């Protein structure tokens, strides 16, 4: 299965059985259907079930289990979640008016997404608004608000699918598309053209236009130039449409994209830094010293808790951008020939592994400590007093003790640091003429966030549920 063209990669499509499974139009539907049914269950539980976040399948399954598993899956499999995402699936079913068949007519005005928003700006805005709404409306602790949120998001994606072509929502507006896309660059899995030369000489380019075997890429990617996982959600349409059998589905080393990328973008760089701030803030509000700190600020400023928290939230988003800009400014002063913009964009990608592991270490505690709470809930998913499996009274213990969880978190942090430093040095070599020392200010930036997060993780935590 070793790829003939790329010896450091294993092409899963070389395997006959895997190829026929992935080329089958029903395969995707079989992943999507259970996810859609689960979403229906969650919405029902949110509206009509018990309003206790510890006992509702709506809150535990979405905010403890799904959200934690999502971050883990990004590190291991890339955007694999998106191929079964029930929101994307329902938008696509409405648009195509079929579950899996290839049809030519779509129920959509097929408008083009506005050019000025073909970036991560709307996705970043939605992400920040939802993160803020979580604090303000206690989303993670409220089954009914979780259900309202799901229905609102579903309504939005259906409307966008009817107005705009393909999966415009997933590419440009999904609140988590930025997070998913950037973290996916770390995954040891990629879908790529086997040979870029073959694409260059291909006149038909069915991966772009679609043909009788499959649709044009739903997220507007072109395998011939694709060099990172950011937007490809592994839907495998191009494996069906490519008449030259020029698509590979590779297993590769971790952080593969980060060691090879050549095109960098300012919107992605800013998103990476913003994500770093949001991740730290989400952990900060859960540690015990936070309560004392905000109380002191309220007394000192006379402001309400909501105002203090809002100002700190904005500070947390802006702070990494500011500190990073100073680090890049110093790099630029040391090496005048390099442009500030190129340095800013290029080195930002080296922060991804640390940011991902910070996110993972935050969520792994929730999963290991609170995830077992789903066991009794499965026996009585709506809190109606049922006991389907005879375990509704079961009092689950955490999967790991607190100290062991802290060890796992620190291990993840060191893995993130190791990858970040190695990617940073690689970027110096490939993009900045081997100017290793230009990376030193960025390395200091990375170390500041690494040490601060280690401290935050070591603080006593107040749980979501
Ligand atoms: S159809 Fe296949 S060979 Fe042609 S451009 Fe697309 S991926 Fe490349
Ligand atoms: S590049 Fe291929 S697998 Fe990736 S999203 Fe586009 S069509 Fe799907």
Image (cartoon, grey):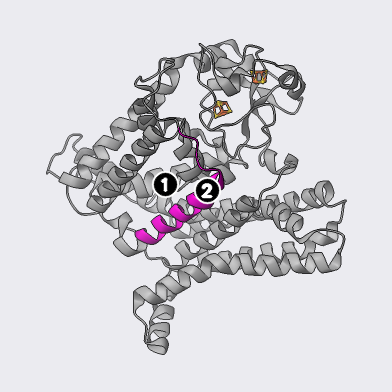
Closer to the camera, 214 or 297? 214
Q: Quadrant of the C terminus?
A: bottom left
Q: Quadrant of the N terminus?
A: top right
Q: Is residue 8 visible?
A: yes
Q: What residue sits 62% from the left and 54% below the top?
A: 354
Which one is closest to the eye, mark 2 or mark 1?
2
SS assignment for the magenta stretch, majority: helix
Closer to the camera, 441 or 389? 441
Q: Which of the two labelled residues, at mark 2 and mark 1, occupies the earlier sequence position? A: 1
> Could you say which quadrant of the image residue 205 lies in?
top right
Q: What residue sits 83% from the left and 52% below the top?
A: 432
- Left or right? Give the position of 267 relative to 305: right
Q: Is residue 402 above or below residue 156?
A: below
Q: Quadrant of ligand 2?
A: top right
Q: How many numbered badges does the structure rendering display?
A: 2
Instruction: Give the residue furthest to the left.
Output: 385
Q: Which mark is residue 67?
A: 1
Q: Horizontal and vertical percent for residue 282?
A: 45, 62
Instruction: State the SS at label 2.
Output: helix
Q: Which residue is mark 2?
A: 179
Q: Horizontal and vertical percent for residue 397?
A: 33, 51
- Left or right? Give the position of 444 relative to 150: right
Q: Is residue 216 above or below residue 282?
A: above
Q: Is residue 452 above or below residue 32?
A: below
> Could you say which quadrant of the image residue 390 lies in?
top left
Q: Which residues are magenta?
A: 111-133
Instruction: State the SS at label 1.
Output: helix
Magenta-span inclusion, residue 12? no
């Amino acid at each position: 299965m070793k790829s003939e063209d790329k010896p450091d990669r294993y092409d899963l499509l070389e395997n006959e059985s895997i190829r026929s499974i992935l080329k089958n139009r029903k395969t995707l539907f079989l992943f999507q259907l259970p996810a859609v049914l689960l979403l229906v269950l969650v919405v029902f539980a949110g509206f009509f079930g018990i309003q206790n976040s510890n006992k509702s399948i709506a809150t535990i399954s979405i905010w403890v289990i799904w959200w934690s598993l999502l971050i883990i899956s990004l590190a291991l499999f890339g955007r694999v979640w998106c191929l079964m995402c029930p929101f994307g699936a329902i938008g696509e079913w409405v648009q195509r008016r079929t579950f899996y068949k290839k049809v030519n007519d779509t129920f959509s005005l097929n408008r083009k997404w506005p050019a000025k928003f073909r970036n991560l700006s709307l996705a970043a805005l939605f992400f920040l608004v939802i993160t803020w709404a979580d604090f303000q409306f206690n989303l993670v602790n409220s089954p009914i608000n979780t259900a309202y949120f799901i229905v609102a998001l579903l309504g939005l994606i259906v409307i966008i699918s009817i107005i705009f072509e393909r999966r415009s929502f997933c590419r440009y507006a999904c609140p988590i598309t930025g997070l998913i896309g950037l973290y996916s660059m770390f995954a040891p899995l990629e879908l790529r053209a086997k040979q870029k030369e073959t694409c260059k000489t291909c006149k038909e380019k069915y991966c772009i236009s679609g043909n009788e075997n499959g649709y044009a890429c739903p997220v507007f990617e072109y395998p011939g130039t694709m060099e990172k996982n950011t937007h490809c959600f592994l839907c495998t349409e191009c494996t069906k449409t490519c008449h030259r059998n020029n698509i590979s589905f590779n297993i590769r080393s971790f952080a593969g994209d980060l060691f090879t990328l050549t095109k960098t973008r300012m919107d992605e760089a800013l998103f990476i830094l913003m994500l770093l701030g949001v991740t730290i803030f989400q952990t900060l509000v859960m540690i015990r010293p936070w309560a004392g700190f905000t109380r002191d600020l309220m007394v000192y400023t006379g402001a309400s808790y909501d105002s203090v928290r809002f100002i700190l939230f904005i500070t947390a988003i802006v702070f990494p951008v500011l500190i990073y800009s100073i680090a890049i400014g110093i790099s630029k002063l040391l090496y005048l020939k390099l442009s500030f913009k190129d340095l800013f964009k290029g080195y930002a990608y080296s922060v991804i592994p640390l940011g991902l592991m910070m996110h993972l270490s935050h969520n792994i505690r929730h999963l290991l400590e609170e995830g077992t709470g789903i066991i009794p809930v499965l026996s009585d998913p709506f809190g109606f007093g049922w006991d389907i499996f005879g375990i509704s009274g079961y009092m689950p213990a955490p999967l790991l003790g607190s100290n062991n969880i802290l060890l796992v978190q620190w291990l993840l942090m060191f893995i993130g640091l190791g990858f970040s430093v190695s990617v940073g040095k690689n970027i110096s070599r490939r993009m900045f003429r081997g100017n290793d020392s230009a990376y030193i200010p960025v390395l200091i930036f990375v170390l500041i966030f690494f040490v601060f997060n280690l401290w935050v993780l070591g603080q006593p935590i107040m749980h979501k549920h």
